[in-house]
Image (cartoon, rainbow, N blue to C red):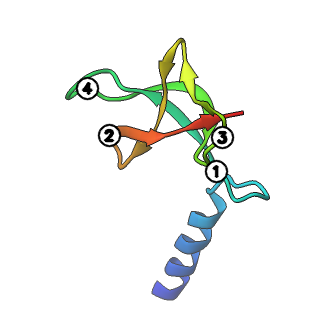
Amino acid sequence: MPAIAIVFAVAAAFATQAKDENGSALVDAYIPMGPGQPCENTGLKCETTVLPNICTYQGQQAFGLEGLTSCSVDLYRD
């Protein structure tokens, strides 16, 4: 039974990764709200692969989540 749970967990982890044929990942973009504050989801999806433009939302740079609470991963758009 534990082996089935491990196989399921690994399969679920791979299934949730949104990747295209180039290996880049589309992830939710967040805006930092300030020290000690949660990050706000913008509703945008941006790339983790370096592209010509930085991901922005209403003129502010948007980031991907690092861990559960820190939005500090640089994101990009075409």
Along the horizontal axis of the image, is 53 left or right of 59?
right
Q: Residue furthest right?
A: 21
Tag nearer the camera, 2 or 3: 3
- At label 1, counting other C-alpha atoms closer than 10 Å, the crowd grade (few under 14, some 14-19, many 20 or more) is some
Residue holding disc 4: 37
Neighbour tally class for label 4: few under 14, some 14-19, many 20 plus, Cα within 10 Å: few
Image-quadrant location for residue 33: top left
Residue 73 x %, y %: 44, 43
Tell whether label 4 touches label 1 (CB within 8 Å).
no
Please tell me which residue is depicted at 60% across the width and 36% down the height of the picture: 76
Residue in the image at 32% along x and 40% along y: 69
Q: Label 4, label 3: how many angstroms apart (C-alpha)? A: 29 Å
Q: Amino acid at mark 2?
A: Thr
Which residue is labeled 3 in the image?
Answer: 51
Residue of label 2: 69
Residue 61 shows in the view: yes
| Above or below for 61 versus 7 | above
Whichever of labels 2 and 3 marks the residue nearer the N terminus, that label is: 3
In the image, residue 21 sits, relative to residue 26, either above or below, namely below
Give coordinates of residue 29: x percent, y percent.
53, 32
Residue depicted at x 75% and y 57%: 22
Do residues under tags 3 and 1 come within 8 Å of each other at their CB atoms? no
Name the amino acid, label 3. Leu
Q: What is the C-alpha distance between the residues marked 3 and 1?
A: 12 Å
Crowd rating for badge 3 (residues with CA inside 10 Å; few <14, some 14–19, many 20+): few
In the figure, 10 relative to 27: above or below? below
Label 3 SS? loop
Q: Which mark is residue 25?
A: 1
Q: Secondary structure at mark 4?
A: loop
Q: CA distance from mark 2 to mark 1?
A: 20 Å
